[in-house]
Amino acid sequence: MKRFFPIVISILITFSLLSASEREFGKMLNKSAEMISLGDYNQAAHGLKRLIHISTDKNILMSSYFLLGYVEYRKENYDSSISNFRFSLKYAFDETNRSVIYLWIAKSFYQINLLDSSEIYFSKIKNNLPIKGLYSETYFYESLLKFKEAKVDSALSILSKIFYRSPPKWILNNLYYAYAYLTHFKYPRPVTNRIIDSLLEIDKTKKIYMLKGYFEIEDSSFTEAESSLKESLKNKNCQFAKYTYTLLLWDLIYQNKFSEVTKLYNDTLDIPEYNESILFLYGYSLEKIRNYSKAINVFNNLIELYPQSRYVPYALFFKGLSLININSYKPALNLFENFESVYPKYHNLYYYSRYYHAYTLYNLGQYNDALKIFESITEKTSDFKEKDRTYYMIAKCYQNLKLYKDAIVYFKVILDSFPNSPNIDYAKYNIATLNYMMKKYRTALKQFESLSMGNKLPKNINENIYFYIEKCHFKLGKYKNIIEMAIAFVRKYPHMDKSRELISEIDLYYRNRGNIKQLINFYSYMVDSTSQLSDKSYYIKTLAEIYADIGYYESSLNYYNKLEFKTFDDNLKIADLLIKLKRYNNAIQILRKMLADYPSSQYYNKILFNISRCYSGIGEYQESENILNKIAVSYDSLKIDTFYVNTIISLSDLYAKNGKITDAESLLSNTAEKVRIMKYMLYIKLADLYYSEDKYDEAIKAAK
């Protein structure tokens, strides 16, 4: 818009007005021009049409038709703009004015791709015009016209002429980009790259960086493209900023930088020509980073806003995958069924939809129905890229139908026909497990041992392989019972997650049978045999807890003291053991250090409570009472918990020891009325107090 007035208004509105009416028309014309400069095209068009209707002055009519043509051009109504520009020509007799109008007619034809007509009007323009902007603009658009006609050499030659004419800034800003862009149609990429690099410093618009990034994407230099595109986006006012933003999203997708796409996504940025692709890329990235619920919302939004978009089938498909990943199998099943009814078999996603259609049936336990679809995919498609996965799922269907021999046949298809399949090791693992289930233990053992020597399976399956090896040994008579086998496994592989699971089962086995000695021996062995700090700490704590449970406080204390790093709970348990061993001063020393180390209120009261126990243990009941009162007063009535109630019970004991029986009774009674938890304990304690004072009626009432 800024360039419109110097080039056009200064040329067209340069006539002397003689009559009062002509002066009034001139004001109206200037008012319309002002509306155009403000972007109010509808108001401007209304005024210009009125002028055309009421004025007979040729200059007024020439200018009015021209400005009306310009308004239509800006509104992309190019047929209408051409019509108005031609009317303007009827009243233009000055060569300069006619050249300006020719230029805009040529540009309008160019926009609707009528290149021959555009060429005719460009040829009418005089080269020796006094306005340099008109010369540069004429040749700039003529070069674009030559490019559209596939005359790249002519286009480059014309652009070269403009370089030496000191063109206006707006043309200069586009000139470098246009020249760089056209060179890649004529020269090899290395030459084009050198030209682009030479223009980077002098191009202040950052458009060349966008072009550089575009070519780098074409060359699969995605990291370099990311850098170039981000440099281009530093100019937020660049006319290609929105396109650059879209290119950058695609580039990040190519690099699998899905998290960065979701961070870069800006839902307030309206890019009508790219909104569909941007929404899809955003949803696709969310699906890739496993934000499935949000991805589903984005895909739904895309489908609703752009129902005719070429991205709709892809949005539907990836929405289906997102539904599968959140275990919404029935909605996913409906989606894939609908997809197959809408899109033809030749659509590149059709058989992928069939695959996931069957996959949802499999996850819904409908193995026979899933099997039919999986088998139809292998029979009807020769170029489906996921055939190995399809055979794998056929085998899994047979496995779940307990048709183990059929399952093995299809797992072997993968081994024989798809040597590079990522499912090779999974197939071998399943064959081994099926042989184990069919009681072919020696065969299974060999297969599991072979797998253990090297595979690409995840950690949990690898641990299962080693576990199956021991189970095969057990079935072949190496171990007396399953517990002996489990202990042997744990001793061989102490740091495996599977071992941790087995340790819990061994622990439960011994506890249920009261075999505490064997349990202690087992954990003692684990402490001595493991070097991993986290595991060793767990075994030490477990031993400490076992000894504490059976009243061996000294042994428990010894194990807690072996811990290299002690948590808050560890220190509190040590203090508790010291109190039980009547080492009150040692306990107080630890607890006071904990007050300094853990000033947070969530720990503070627990520490104070145990300090109170210490004072009570050494007979300083009043000090103990003061501490418990401090805890009770600090409690929020809305956050009362079991710790608070236990504090009240302990405080009532101290009141009783200090001879404050009535205070103890009131404390228990009032607390029982206001709390919702442990009422039973409070009333039993109150009944005991009444009973100790021979208040039998009150005791019975409290107990009830």
Image (tube, rainbow, N blue to C red):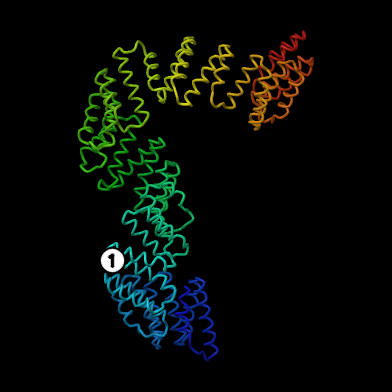
Residue 230: percent from left, percent from top:
43, 57
Q: Which image quadrant is residue 135 in?
A: bottom left
Q: Residue, x 35% and y 74% (percent of image)?
A: 141
Camera-nearest residue between 499 and 618? 618
Q: Residue, x 31% and y 68% (percent of image)?
A: 182
Q: Is residue 379 above or below residue 201?
A: above
Q: Secondary structure at mark 1?
A: helix
Camera-nearest residue between 682 and 33? 682
Q: Which image quadrant is residue 74 in?
A: bottom left
Is residue 492 at least partly visible in the picture?
yes
Q: Is residue 646 left or right of residue 314?
A: right
Q: Is residue 139 left or right of residue 660?
A: left
Q: Is residue 141 left or right of residue 614?
A: left
> Which residue is the site of mark 1?
185
Q: Residue, x 30% and y 65% (percent of image)?
A: 191
Is residue 104 at least partly visible in the picture?
no
Residue 662: percent from left, percent from top:
79, 16
**Residue extending farthest bottom:** 18
* Crowding at mark 1 (Cα within 10 Å: few <14, some 14-19, many 20+): some
Residue 357: percent from left, percent from top:
32, 38
Residue 686: percent from left, percent from top:
72, 15
Q: Is residue 600 left or right of residue 537?
A: right
Amino acid identity at mark 1: Phe
